[in-house]
Image: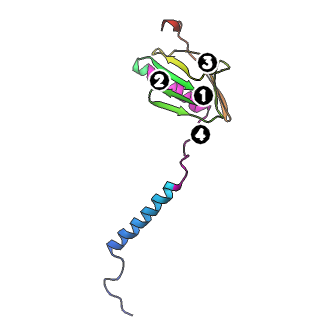
């Protein structure tokens, strides 16, 4: 049996096959669940508060950290968590929205935060401003 010299796949054949494979990958990727977000625990909440304080200290401007029952916001940054994590202030539950004022000297107004998650708990001790009412 003799083979022709030009037998085999052409570049066009390879492009078509690669296009089909890429299309299938797009369809499969779109059908995968989107819950790839890491689980937020007490350490992540403590790190978020620490980062917010660092940003305020570096900028030299007062900032506000807002804590809601299932999220925490500082500027454009937000951290959300599930119902299995609880953030309390001085052993009491937080109101619907709790605001900590962060000052450039590293202190803030508000209570010591306590964070409980199934993986552990953390206390975020505040360095309180000597007279927050002058603020």
Q: Which of marks 2 and 1 is nearer the N terminus?
A: 2
Q: Earlier in the sequence, mark 1 or mark 4?
A: 4
Q: Which of marks 4 and 3 is nearer the N terminus?
A: 4
**On the image, numbered disc 1 is attached to which residue?**
69
Disc 3 to disc 1: CB gap under 8 Å: no
Crowd around label 1: few <14 · some 14–19 · many ≥20 (10 Å): some
Residues in magenta?
Answer: 31-56
Which percent across, then down, holds residue 72? 54, 28
Please name whichever residue, 123 or 76, is drawn nearer the observer in this view of the structure: 76
- In the image, taking residue 116 as reference, residue 105 lies left or right, namely left
Quick check: 44 above or below 10? above
**On the image, numbered disc 4 is attached to which residue?**
39
Name which residue lies at 34% across and 83% down.
7
Is label 3 in a helix, a strand or a loop? loop
**On the image, numbered disc 2 is attached to which residue?**
54
Crowd around label 3: few <14 · some 14–19 · many ≥20 (10 Å): some
Is label 2 in a helix, a strand or a loop? helix
Q: Does the magenta stretch include residue 114?
A: no
Quick check: 41 above or below 87? below
Structural distance between the alpha carbons of marks 2 and 1: 23 Å
Which dot, 2 or 1, sits closer to the camera?
1
Which dot, 3 or 2, sits closer to the camera?
3
Structural distance between the alpha carbons of marks 1 and 4: 16 Å
**On the image, numbered disc 3 is attached to which residue?**
112
């Amino acid at each position: 049996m003799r083979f022709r010299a030009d037998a085999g796949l052409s570049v066009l054949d390879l492009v078509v096959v690669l296009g089909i494979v890429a299309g299938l990958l797009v369809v499969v990727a779109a059908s995968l669940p989107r819950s790839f977000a890491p689980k937020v625990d007490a350490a992540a909440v403590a790190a978020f508060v620490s980062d917010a304080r660092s940003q305020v200290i570096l900028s030299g401007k007062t900032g506000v950290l807002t804590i809601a029952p299932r999220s925490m916001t500082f500027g454009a940054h937000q951290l959300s968590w599930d119902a299995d994590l609880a953030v309390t202030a001085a052993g009491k539950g937080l109101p619907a929205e709790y605001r900590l004022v962060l000052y450039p000297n590293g202190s803030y107004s508000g209570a010591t935060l306590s964070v409980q998650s199934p993986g552990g708990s953390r206390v975020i001790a505040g360095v309180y401003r000597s007279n927050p009412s002058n603020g």
